[in-house]
Image (spheres, rainbow, N blue to C red):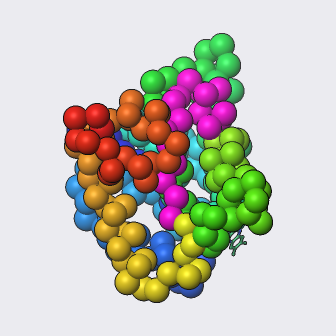
Amino acid sequence: MARVLINFAHPALEKSRVHQQLLAAIKGVKGITFNDLYEWYPDLDIDVAREQQLLERHDIILLQHPFYWYSAPAIIKQWMDLVLEHGWAYGHTGKALQGKYLSNIISAGSAESGYHPEGKHQYPVREFLLPFSQTAALCNMQYLAPYVIYGVHRMDIEDVRGAAQHYRNLLEQLRDDKITPEALTRLTYMNEALQLPSQTR
Ligand SMILES: Cc1cc2nc3c(=O)[nH]c(=O)nc-3n(C[C@H](O)[C@H](O)[C@H](O)COP(=O)(O)O)c2cc1C
């Protein structure tokens, strides 16, 4: 079984429509470690040793968050700045993360059609995530196709619940090696994984 860590960041979970449902759907999924960064560090005062130990104990690290200004809520940046230390995560002797996988699990207010050259955001979400994929590369990790739930502003609660079940399904398959990280490095978005024939996942 792959050891999956979810580093979750939402600065106002009490007002959330989407991530509350995602959390409800994945609650109790066995073998997955859930780490709520704003709950642990409401003042952004990150315990670097704790976070590094968590990373060392897992193979697949998922950053789950709403898409904020084409990126992530502030604590994710703080986490990267402090936890991914030179000599530990990167640099000559920095090999702690070698062979692990990183990805983003994102909800976006806008529809997918907005993330095209003719759309209002002009670029695909995957391009906005370059700081994450390149950080993974510098830290000797492989970046996996991100999972994106688009158009959440227009979803009703049933749509959100459906997306949440889809996410749970994906996590279980990832944990059980039914969807392999290798397959996800070849995809553009993780959303495509459930459509693949099972032998190529
Ligand atoms: C500060 C802020 C920035 C946002 N930036 C984006 C953005 O760049 N692109 C986008 O599609 N949606 C953006 N949104 C919409 C959020 O992604 C959306 O509200 C969130 O995914 C909904 O999840 P929730 O119900 O769990 O809060 C932004 C929302 C906020 C509050």
Q: Give residue 38's position: percent from left, percent from top.
A: 57, 65
Q: Give residue 90's position: percent from left, percent from top.
A: 64, 24
Location of residue 44 with respect to 90 vertically, above or below: below
Q: Give residue 13's position: percent from left, percent from top.
A: 54, 77
Quadrant observed for ligand 1 in the rendered image: bottom right
The residue at 55%/75% (across/down) is 152
The residue at 35%/74% (across/down) is 162
Q: Residue furthest front?
A: 118
Tell whether 185 sits left or right of 168.
right
Q: Image quadrant for the C terminus?
A: top left
Range of magenta residues: 133-149
Q: Give residue 42's position: percent from left, percent from top.
A: 62, 68
The answer to which of 57 and 7 lies nearer the viewer is 7
Location of residue 183 with respect to 19 vertically, above or below: above
Q: How many marks?
A: 0
Residue 192 visible in this rendered orientation of the protein: yes
Residue 102 visible in this rendered orientation of the protein: no
Q: Is residue 137 found inside the magenta-colored segment of the image?
A: yes
The residue at 77%/66% (across/down) is 120
The residue at 73%/63% (across/down) is 119
Q: Image quadrant for the N terminus?
A: top left
Q: Is residue 29 found inside the magenta-colored segment of the image?
A: no
